[in-house]
Image (cartoon, rainbow, N blue to C red):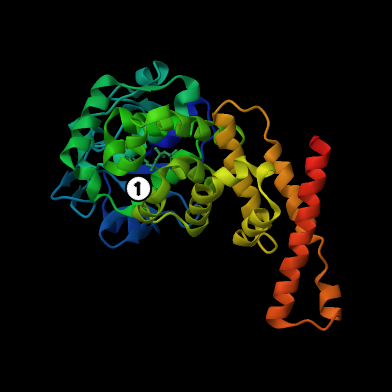
Amino acid sequence: MQIYKVGGAVRDRLLGRPVSDVDWLVVGATVEKMQALGYRPVGADFPVFIDPKSGQEYALARTERKSGRGYGGFVFHASPDVTLEQDLIRRDLTINAMAEDQQGNLYDPYFGKKDLDQRILRHVSPAFAEDPLRVLRVARFAARYAPLGFRVAPETLELMRQISASGELQALTAERSWKEIERALMEEQPQVFIQVLRDCDALRELMPELDALFAAPQDAGMHTLAALEQAAKHQQPLNVRWACLTQALGTAINAVNQRFKAPRECQELALLVGEFQAHCHRAQQLDAATLLDLLQKFDVYRRPQRFEDFIAACEMDARGRGGEDYPQGDYLRGAVAAAKAVEVKSLVAQGLTGQALGAALKAERLKALEAYTQSAIAQRN
Ligand code: CTP
């Protein structure tokens, strides 16, 4: 029995990048032997084990054949006679198909090291097409390694195009797709993820609404990419990046949210940004009643962070259009402070309760915002 380090851990060590989790490959063993050695199986019909001491994953060498459409359609063949080369050839990219034994020797039958040195994302074999998720994975790796100068090999892009044309991307579950999208958005150059999906026609399959923006007037598609790029440059969290990606989709934002079952925080912010972004950009021109309405809609008194995320997404949008600073942000923060300064206590002391208290609070906040907008106008003149 031989144990090899495989996949991302080998790749990232060679790239000099931090290695987050290590995957091990076991050649020449059986399920029974692994269990006898104390490894714990992760599932009933999957030849993968966890080492209870380290928590790391050990997979038996296997060949994989597709037996149908979708992710369920896999047949695994794991047996002690499956070789290292046979296991590695079914993997996605050459840079992910290298192995290292326990003495540190590199096994690289598909020239991953050369592709790593030449900064190429290249598929290992036609088996790539057996998992359509790999289209998203390649786009994600392109986003991650773009700062290092990586690009997708033309023949791999062509294969990705064929997968897009086959309709197989439609069979991906929302959960698997979202996991890739989420990780890609958090990479250093998330706009490259979208660009690669577009280059291989996968964007048209996954998010036709976004793809259509590239044909829209004023190049709304390129602008979306620029906003996303800014969001990454300013290290914005996932919900802000998702809102930047979806902000120009108008009435389709909800459908895209649902399609990928985006987490609630992302869904919510995307919808709010879609609806109120124009307000934010024109903040200084809003009258007090509209401002109050905006703050109420955001429930800013109880959810200040969501409002901050909203401002951030709008700012990234403006920066994506070449804006250098965004005074709208501080102006809105000032409005929040003015509205928050209204004392509920003094209204309660007047004996107000229930609806009457709510109405009085709103009226006082409106007064405060009128004073705020007036003084801002005075300062400007
Ligand atoms: N793999 C694959 N096809 C997939 C998923 C995984 O071929 N759809 C293979 C690749 O060899 C990959 C390894 O399984 O390197 C481990 O997969 P995973 O842990 O998902 O990715 P990593 O390559 O470790 O990358 P990351 O840094 O993104 O975790």
Instruction: Looking at the picture, tell me which residue is in the foreground, 67 or 228.
Output: 228
Q: Is residue 329 left or right of residue 50?
A: right
Instruction: Looking at the picture, tell me which residue is in the foreground, 152 or 293.
Output: 293
Picture coordinates of residue 219 (x, y %)?
Answer: 41, 28
Picture coordinates of residue 96 (x, y %)?
Answer: 36, 32
Residue at position x 48%, y 45% from top? 242
Quadrant in the picture for residue 262? bottom left
Q: Is residue 314 left or right of residue 147?
A: right
Instruction: Looking at the picture, tell me which residue is in the foreground, 46 or 214.
Output: 214
Residue at position x 40%, y 33% from top? 193
Q: Which residue in the rendered view is the most extreme toward the left?
A: 67
Picture coordinates of residue 335 (x, y %)?
Answer: 74, 51
| Ligand 1 picture quarter | top left
Specify whether tag 1 is near ligand 1 (CB below 8 Å).
Answer: no
Q: Looking at the rendering, in which quadrant would you find the C terminus?
A: top right
Instruction: Looking at the picture, tell me which residue is in the foreground, 175 or 58.
Output: 175
| 64 over 194 or under it: above or below | below
Residue at position x 53%, y 46% from top? 238
Q: Is residue 328 left or right of residue 275?
A: right
| 288 over 381 or under it: above or below | below
Q: Which residue in the rendered view is the most extreme toward the top?
A: 118
Dot 1 crowding, Cα within 10 Å, few <14, some 14–19, many 20+ = some
Q: Which residue is mark 1?
A: 177
Q: Amino acid at mark 1?
A: Ser
Number of numbered discs: 1
